[in-house]
Amino acid sequence: MKLLTIRIQNFRRHADAKLSLGDGVNILYGRNGAGKTNLLEAIHYAALTKSFLNASDSECLKFGATHFEIDAVWQNDRNVEATVRVYFSNEEGKTVFVNRSPLESFSKIVGEFPCVSLSPFDIALVQGAPQERRRFLDSSISQTNKAYLEDLLAYRRLLNQRNKLLSDMKVARNATQHELLAVWTESFASLVASIMFRRLKFVSEFSEVLKKAYRLFHSFDETPTLQYDSDVKLGEQATREEILSEVRLKLARLQDEEIRRGITLLGTHRDDLSFYINDISVKKFASQGQQKTFVICLKLAQHFYIQSILNEKPIFLLDDVFSELDRSRADDLIELLKPMGQSVITTTEKKQFDGITQILIENDGLYTTA
């Protein structure tokens, strides 16, 4: 997947900017505050309709502007071009057009323009709350499996409905509510089983891809592993039916406590992912350098995984990655990225690398340099 051109209007600090990228490694360099990260954000919007920094749409609106627009021209690995336009205003909300046709659901674009991003904030994958790791899981699987994404969206809707019902039953109960809870619990259990089954399958497959990513760095003499953590205790090879049976049993045991507390106490929204290096917890015992290395390899592995499933190289967005690496590892990373398709990297200074495109970002425009 390649981004040929992107035009940005009233997005973050850019009033009106246009960027053209090369096929391989592209470095956007310039002083702090020039808007380099904003350009990566805009590219992520054109791929997945949202910021990789988890910013809201209104936060991305240039101060004083009434709306922002992003217009992108993509070309996939079969040389087929497509256009994406993202329009947002506080009054009208967000609209996304693919080849000039509006999307009824933003989820429809997921996986069409595969994208992987890496920023300093991704250290939260190892240091942060479980929701950060669930987001990584869901992003990786959703871009390669539309059925998973549909189940995930249905699960979130049903979870909200079930929690509302449990909250109501905490105050007052009647037979109708108990009947409705039984129906929703069965649907909920089915979605839990489907999502967990796909997550366990992903963890098993992704573990091998992550080991491959580590081996690409000759200076890394470590073996990474992953573990899916859930209140439903089953092995990675469990079938969907085995998971469903266990989930039904646990929900039945928890029903009285759920009603008493007015909230769902079991489900994939409570699960987590544990990371290990040489069987030692990355979160608890790894050095800061090891944690940063682990995150970089996670993202490389995510790229490899998505490519292997879709047979399409994702665009790779790397924000301020060189500040995390010494020169030797920076050289290694550039050489790894060259055959991986198109990548866009932000940094403050021009770099001495061969065979890449470097683009100077200034407040009054964008200038391509050798």
Image (cartoon, rainbow, N blue to C red):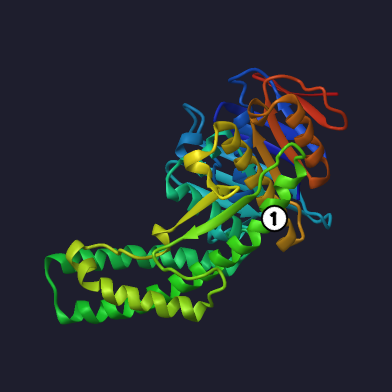
Task: Identify the residue shown where x is 73% and y is 51%.
Answer: 212
Viewer-side residue, 18 vs 230: 230
Residue in view at x 48 percent, y 47 percent: 132
Q: How many marks?
A: 1
Up/down of 313 relative to 282, above or below: below
Asked whether, in this view, residue 291 is left or right of residue 305, the answer is left
Q: Position of residue 218 (x, y in %)?
A: 77, 39
Report x, y in % for residue 281: 51, 46
Tell me: residue 125, above or below residue 325: below
Give the vertical position of 237 relative to 153 (above or below): below
Question: Which residue is depicted at the point 50% across and 34% down?
Answer: 61
Above or below, comparing residue 145 to residue 314 in the picture? below
Q: Secondary structure at mark 1?
A: helix
Query: In the displayed image of the protein, which residue is found farthest to the left?
Result: 172
Mark 1 packing: few (<14 Cα in 10 Å), some, or many (20+)?
many
Q: Is 178 displayed left or right of 307 in the figure?
A: left
Task: Residue 11: tell me if it is visible.
Answer: no
Label 1 sits on residue = 209
Residue 142 placement (x, y as % from top left): 58, 60
Compare residues 282 and 206 and report the one nearer the observer: 282
Quarter of the image where one finds residue 171: bottom left
Residue at the right extreme of this rendering: 355
Is 294 displayed left or right of 359 in the figure?
A: left
Does the rendering let one see residue 127?
yes
Amino acid type assigned to the residue bearing label 1 in the image: Val
* Quarter containing the C terminus: top right
Percent position of residue 217, x then y: 75, 40
